[in-house]
Image (spheres, helix red, strand yellow):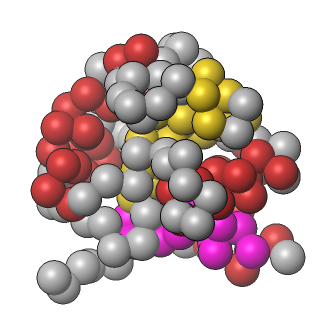
Amino acid sequence: MNIPGDGVSDEEIREIYRVYRKIAVVGMSRNPDKPSHYVPRYLMERGYEIYPINPTADEILGKKVYKSISDLPEDVEILNVFRPSEEIPGIVDEALKKNFKVIWLQEGIYNKDIIKAREKGVTTIWNRCMMKEYKRLFE
């Protein structure tokens, strides 16, 4: 798949990390060897509040797990997505019912439906790892 750039500048990404502290993680894993576990753990270790979303778990990293996006509290700011690209249309539709400031698709994840969120004023980032971007910009 040829993934276009998201057009989001380093300064915009720095601002996201500085301003927003609450990150929901769709597809968060219990397996510590998977990026969908160690990336959110890394962000937690840097002071971010993590809200795991996984329909098959009750607790991950000592955090209550939400079964779906719609179960999240209203004030979560970033939706970080670790799900296959073909699932993005449904995730975007569900996410737009909430008040996210940012929808961030991890490395290798892209679907043109993410543009629907951008058109509604949500900052959208795709094909980037939240951990790698944090390390690149702050460490």
Q: As drawn, is 54 to the left or to the right of 65?
A: left
Q: Quadrant of residue 138?
A: bottom right
Residue 126 colored in magenta in the image: yes
* Residue under the point 84% across and 44% down: 47
Residues in magenta, as a range: 125-135
Q: As drawn, is 10 to the left or to the right of 99?
A: right
* Residue under the point 30% across and 20% down: 97
Residue 122 in sight in this render: yes
Give x and y (percent) for residue 136.
72, 80
Residue 100 in sight in this render: no
**Which part of the image, by quadrant, shows the N terminus?**
bottom left
Note whether 45 is above or below 59 in the view shown. Answer: below
Q: Nearer the viewer, residue 24 or 113?
A: 24
Give x and y (percent) for residue 108.
34, 74
Q: How many marks?
A: 0
Q: As drawn, is 107 to the left or to the right of 65?
A: left
Residue 6 colored in magenta in the image: no
Q: Nearer the viewer, residue 135 or 121?
A: 135
* Residue under the point 51% across and 14% down: 74
Q: Quadrant of residue 38?
A: bottom right
Of all residues, the one furthest to the bottom in this rendering is 2
Give x and y (percent) for residue 86.
14, 56
Give x and y (percent) for residue 33.
58, 66
